[in-house]
Amino acid sequence: MCDRKNPIILIHNILQGNKLCGTVPNKRGFTLVELLMTIVVVGIISIPLSLSLSQHIRSTSVSQENSTAINLGRLQMEEVNNIPGASILIGTTNINYTGYPYDITRTVTYVQQAPPESLKRITVEVRKSGSAAILVSFVTYIAANVLYGI
């Protein structure tokens, strides 16, 4: 029962939450404008965060690839240093380690300024499989009749 002319009954109905009077607005929810503003603010904040996260993931992947390439190159250089100088053949050798998607090329040449066949230049290059771009390159020199690793 809603009597808008009697102030005492009107106040009583408002305090009781009588919805039939229509004088008490519903304060239990959010308005459409509030929801839209929240969505806009969350969207504005989330775009830079998602871009930053994707850049971080990409740089971590590149860093991991470079670390693996460096370690494979170092491993190949250690193998070369453990081979006697006379056993290292002139030419290019392709090496593939099982489980790693990298192409490793070892090139052995004679150094022209040294006495004939006394100094060899060994170059190890590591590439991603199927790519021409060199990720890492190592160079060392091996002299004839010199023992290494003693």
Image: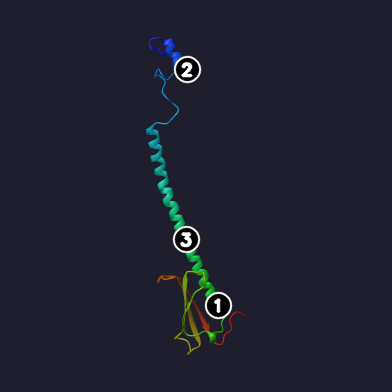
Counting from the top left corner in percent of width and height, residue 82 is at 57, 80
**Structural crowding at the residue carrying mark 3, measured as other residues with C-alpha within 10 Å and reported as few (<14), some (14–19) or many (≥20):** few
Report the residue marked by disc 3: 61
For marks 3 and 1 on the same chain, the one whose residue lies earlier in the sequence: 3
Answer with left or right where residue 40 lies relative to residue 143.
left
Q: In the image, what residue type sits under mark 2?
A: Gln
Q: Disc 3 or 2, which lies upstream in sequence?
A: 2
Check if mark 3's residue and mark 2's residue have beta carbons within 8 Å: no
Estimate the x, y position of residue 27 in percent, counting from the top left: 44, 26
Q: Residue at x 49, y 63 (%)?
A: 64
Q: Of the residues under marks 1 and 2, which one precedes in the sequence? A: 2
- Callout 3, which amino acid? Ser
Q: Element type at marker 1? A: helix
Disc assigned to residue 16: 2
Q: CA distance from mark 3 to mark 1?
A: 27 Å
Residue 93 x, y percent position in the rendering: 47, 80
The answer to whether 17 is drawn above or below residue 135 in the figure is: above
- In the rendered image, which quarter contains the C terminus? bottom right
Circle 3: element type: helix
Q: Residues within 10 Å of mark 1 (few under 14, many from 20)?
A: few
The kind of secondary structure element at disc 2 is helix
Residues under numbered marks 1 and 2 in contact, where contact means CB atoms less than 8 Å apart: no
Foreground residue among 12 and 45: 12
Outermost residue, front direction? 1
Q: Which residue is mark 1?
A: 79
Spatial distance from mark 3 to mark 2, Cα to Cα? 64 Å
